[in-house]
Image (cartoon, helix red, strand yellow):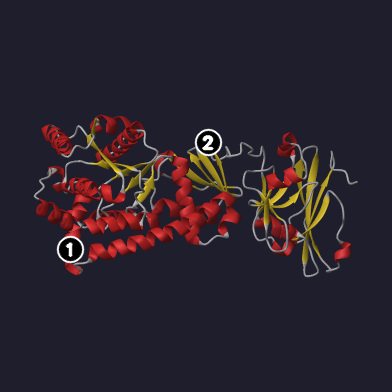
Amino acid sequence: MIEKVAEWIEKDELIAPGDCVLAGVSGGADSVCLLLLLLKLRQRLRFTVCAVHVEHGIRGADSGRDAAFVEELCRQRQIPCHTCAVDVPAYAAREGLGTEEAARALRYECYLKVAEKLGYERVRVALAHHADDNAETMLFSLARGSGIAGLGGIRAVRRLSERVTIIRPLLAATRTQIEAWLSAQGQPYCIDATNEDTDYSRNKIRHEVMPRLAEVNRKAVFHMAQSARLLQETADYIGREAARAAEQTCVFGRGSCRIAGELFDEYPHIIRSEAVRRVLAETAGSGKDIGSVHVEAVLALAGMQVGRGVDLPYGLRAARVYGGIFIGRAGEEMRQSGGNAPARVREIPREELMRLEAGEELSVALDGGEMRLRILDFSGRTEEIPKKKYTKWLNYDKIKNSLQIRKRMAGDYLTIDGQGHHKKLKAYFTDEKIPAEKRDDIWLLAEDAKILWVVGGRIGADSRADGHTKKILEVRTIGGSYCED
């Protein structure tokens, strides 16, 4: 057991010479085993050991006896022990949390407080999760639809703050191995009766599901641990790609996010799913109750009409808006994350474009002027294309969706070359040295978040007519300040 744990610590570089290792000790078999193993390894790996015990205020006299057991265990071995008393029921009621979630939150709060008091440059908070805990977590996550990250189970390392990191040295050991080792040492430990209560979901998995898995394959826990490592690596890779996707397509505001639809749709489904999961967690402030059903509901909005929406956990709502998807508090769909929602949007649905194809002309009122649209057959001679500021010929063959005549929205972008590279509209305005106070007044012709034409400025590279173009969408702005040079 000692060599197994030492190998695990060294493999994942869980502890470095000079570290203070603060062991979380409940008094149960797992944490007692962890503490004793750390004591046997501290000289070999050159680290300091302290202990912390959290008394949850749940189990009455039993809770007090566990605290006394841990304190005596540490006194006998001359280990500094820090006991933190918390009131889980009161905290759970105040924060609207379940008992297990509240207990976990308060434990981590205690770990951080004690770690910060110790004054060491690096503190490793060692927790006693083992291979069986990992397998149970994987199954629990699978049942909840938690995605690849959840299926990766419990990580060996997780940073809490700049100086404090959670480590789990026992993930390579099983519950049976831990209890056998303690028995060989003649070391008693506390037994928490609540661990037998199958009203708790995790206990139900432990006592009813895991034994059946062992009947299927006695090395099920070991194999699940191997899979967990692979899934963690996969989740890390997908997470990095999802973060890039979110950076390119999402604009965050206070408690809200707007996803630029067309840009977002270019990414594979698995990347979009993870990006949405992260966006929901960041917007809500927690990812605990975000499941695959919520992620898929948000993704499905991309194919729906503007105005359709779906309610989500934590009081969030996702809605289909012009140019993409808005995620925020219910009723805030039009309060775009950049604070620059247009005062008016004129949508031109496909049915109206079809009437233009039949030879009609459409006129839309602008500020003191108007925009006129018509469709023309094109000869393919590019020299015929007008070089005018307020008259543009666009490649109608490439327009597949409804159009909008509107002011800017967060997430808007221009296609800048024939390879499809994009530039955010904000960056275009900056490059063109357009004053910030004038940007909200500029009219745009858009296809969702893709800007076909900045009125008075450039058109998107993929909107330009070329020798292969069959039909032209002519767009003219006239009257008011829209005077050709």
For residue 401, say whether it is visible.
Answer: yes
Q: Are marks 1 and 2 in contact (CB under 8 Å)?
A: no
325 and 56: which is toward the camera: 56
Q: Residue 237's spot in the image, x, y percent?
A: 47, 59
Find residue 360 and report its image quarter: bottom right
Residue 153 in view here: no
Please identify the residue farthest to the right as the structure is shown.
Answer: 485
The residue where tag 2 is placed is 254
- Residue 338 numbered tag: none
Distance between the alpha carbons at the discs numbered 1 and 2: 47 Å
> Residue 319 appears at what percent x and percent y?
52, 46
Name the quarter where the N terminus is drawn. Answer: bottom left
Rendered location of residue 339, percent (x, y): 61, 36
Q: Count neighbours of disc 2 (C-alpha within 10 A) and say few if under 14, some if 14 to 19, many if 20 or more.
A: few
Sequence-earlier tag: 1 or 2: 1
Q: Amino acid at mark 1?
A: Arg
Q: Say which residue appears at 72% left-offset and 56% top-offset.
A: 416
Picture layout, residue 95 above or below residue 28: above
Task: Please name the residue shown 69% across and 42% down the image.
Answer: 407
Q: Secondary structure at mark 1?
A: helix
476 in relation to 286, above or below: below
Q: Residue at x 73, y 44 (%)?
A: 429
> What residue did someone put label 1 on?
212
Residue 470 left/right relative to 27: right
Residue 10 lies left or right of residue 347; in this view the side is left
Q: Amino acid at mark 2?
A: Arg
Label 2 sits on a secondary structure element that is loop
Neighbour tally class for label 1: few under 14, some 14-19, many 20 plus, Cα within 10 Å? few
Residue nearest the observer in this picture, 173 or 39: 39
